[in-house]
Amino acid sequence: MNRFKTFLSLTGREFRLFKNNPIMVMLFIGGPILYGIIFGAVYQKGKFTDLPVMVVDKDNSAMSTRFIDMLDDMDVLKVVAVKHETINMRTALMNDKALAAVVIPDGFEADLLQNRHPEINAYVNSANLMTSSYVSRGLLTAGGTLNAGIKIGAMQKQGLPVAVAAGQYEAFHSNTFRLYNPASNYMIYSWPSYLAIILQTVTIVVMALSFTSEYEASTFKELCQKSKSVSMMMAIKVIPYWIISIGLAGIMACFYVIFREPFPKHILDAAVIFFLFIAAATFMGMVASIIFKTQLRAVQFLMVLSMTVYIVSGYSWPFDQTGWAARVFAYIFPMMPFVNGYRILLFQSGTLSAISDYTTILVIQVCFYALLSYLLLKIKTWKDMKNSQS
């Protein structure tokens, strides 16, 4: 009973330490809220529309005007300028005033009427791969539609019905079905990566401040004497943050509602991988907290490592396309298994059985970092007790 009272007393002490440290409060609670608001403000639209393109119409014919109108009718494109003279492409595409320049050659309509197969050249600014991909897709769609319309129109002039002309133009139909994110909404796509990198960073950093703040305040020996065991010391350090993480999960759920993000179909499965992720991150932060003697060193070390793990997490760049060294580095952090597993739960309505590989990695990380924390803390307390006795 006395041991339980001691546990509750020390747990309350940890809550007070957290509340009285404005940096920890700002990081653990304020950070995700602030980043969530900024994230939603930037990506709430979700997809590109009205990307500026320029047209150089050297033909100035009814057919070229028709093509320009088709470009402007595309949701993703907006014709911002039509010129009739040759321009410098590099200058025209600079500063994002236009993301593409479409050149319609002189004699375009006449060549079409005489079956000479004229060429329309498009110059796309690929400095930004995302916008260039959308622009290229829009240009190809508009060009393909015009091409098909001209071919079918020519066959109709030869006396073929529309249905027959369309059948002769296409030897086969090709259908592409977009699954799991059919609208190609970038916010829906990037939301799991935001959750992972922010929660991992703030959890690891806040936990790293836990023991280092005890060292700097010279209260570590007092904590050792009151807790009387390494396992209790670890428990009173992690449990408060696990409890706060439940509230943090509630805040994240509010962002789902505000930004109209889809919830995972299997909420309990998502809760399991979320808890494993937070547990692995807290014990990893505890390892750093025991190793480093000052808060500044712990934060500097973890911020550098934690932010770089996004690159090798396999979320944007496929994990199997990275080098072996990058993959080994990714396995150190809980973000890699969480973000890839959570993506399956969120987009593909998967269950825990579908992400067993990722949950296994998280369980291994939890056990490894918890055991490492125990051993390091055992050595640390033994050294401090030995020094105090001498």
Image (cartoon, rainbow, N blue to C red):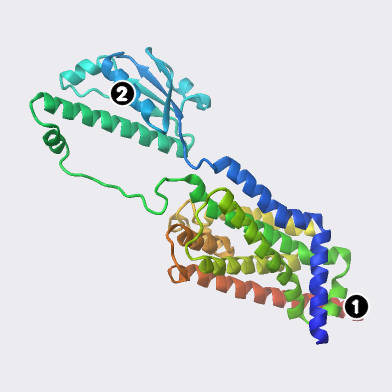
Q: Which residue is mark 1?
A: 388
For residue 242, above or below residue 184? below
Horizontal and vertical percent position of residue 240 = 73, 69
Residue 8, picture quadrant: bottom right
Observer able to see residue 14: yes
Horizontal and vertical percent position of residue 134 = 41, 37
User: Secondary structure under badge 2?
Assistant: helix
The image quadrant where one finds the N terminus is: bottom right
Q: What number is the disc on residue 288?
A: none
Q: What's the residue at 18%, 21% (across, down)?
A: 116
Horizontal and vertical percent position of residue 71 = 36, 27
Q: Which one is nearer the viewer's eye here, 80 or 229? A: 80
Residue 199, picture quadrant: bottom right
For residue 245, above or below residue 121? below
Observer able to see residue 390: no
Q: Are the residues flagged by discs 2 and 1 in contact, CB closer than 8 Å? A: no
User: Secondary structure under badge 1?
Assistant: helix
Q: What number is the disc on residue 67?
A: 2
Q: What's the residue at 43%, 45% (across, down)?
A: 184
Looking at the rendered image, the disc whose residue lies closer to the viewer, 2 or 1, is 2
Q: What's the residue at 56%, 73% (across, down)?
A: 363
Residue type at numbered disc 1: Ser
Residue type at numbered disc 2: Phe
Horizontal and vertical percent position of residue 21 = 82, 58
Q: Dot 2: few (<14), some (14–19), or many (≥20) neighbours within 10 Å?
A: some
Query: Mark 2 or mark 1, which has the lower sequence index?
Result: 2
Question: Would residue 135 be found to the left or right of residue 284 on screen?
Answer: left
